[in-house]
Image (cartoon, grey):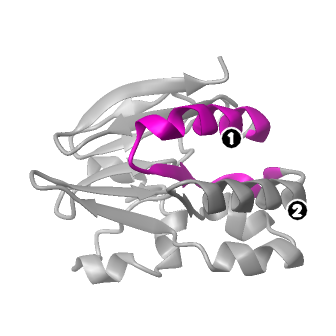
Amino acid sequence: MHDHEKVLAYANDMAKNYDLIVFNGGLCQKNVGERISAMQEFLAGHKAIYIAGRIDYCSANEEASSWINQQCNVAMFEFQMRKLLVMDGGIPKTTQSKSQLFDNLELSFVSTIDAKPWHQSYNGRFGYVISNNLMTDDLPQYHTYSMQIGCKTDERTYAQEVDEIGLKQLFLIGA
């Protein structure tokens, strides 16, 4: 979340139209204490969750790390027709069961497997994954069983609308 104020204002405006808002990592880039306070206030007033990611784990100061460590680093949603995971990283080949996905910090740091983007080896066994993995300079990319929503060089923030059938609209926030 590069422009935190715009993201929260946008999320506040759209919250009434959705059952849940999911924030996918990146809070601890700058002004950490102020950003966490604003996020805590948003989460308290809305049906929303925050998924901690590698930037949060690597950049959080001592004060922020306590809050970051209380957040999940993967969320799974089970719809009638499909499962959806939201995370900051990727899924290693060695992951055998969905229980291995939870409280597994390694997921937040997986970008490549065998020198290729993890998306190329993921076979969808746990559901469709929306990942904020900043592994290329490309804008959001859709793969067969996953989506890369983040980008290394693009400081814009994207939001992916999802329902029980699948992916819907991709929003560019603050543009």
Q: Quadrant of residue 127?
A: bottom left
The secondary structure that most of the magenta stretch takes on is helix
What's drawn in magenta, residue-wise?
Answer: 4-29
Tell me if 119 is positioned left or right of 20 in this view.
left
Can residue 149 be seen in this snapshot? no
Q: Position of residue 5 (x, y in %)?
A: 78, 37
**Residue at horizontal 29 percent and vertical 60 percent from the top:** 77
Q: Which mark is residue 33?
A: 2
**Residue type at numbered disc 2:** Gly
Compare marks 1 and 2 and give the one earlier in the sequence. Answer: 1
Q: Quadrant of the C terminus?
A: top right
Q: Quadrant of the N terminus?
A: top right
**Residue type at numbered disc 1:** Leu
The secondary structure type at the circle numbered 2 is helix
**Residue at horizontal 67 percent and vertical 36 percent from the top:** 7
Q: Is 10 part of what is drawn in magenta?
A: yes
Tell me if 123 is positioned left or right of 40 in this view.
left
As drawn, 12 above or below 60:
above
Q: Which mark is residue 8?
A: 1
Q: Mark 1 near mark 2, Cβ–Cβ under 8 Å?
A: no
Badge 2 crowding class, 10 Å Cα cut-off, few under 14, some 14 to 19, many 20 or more, is some
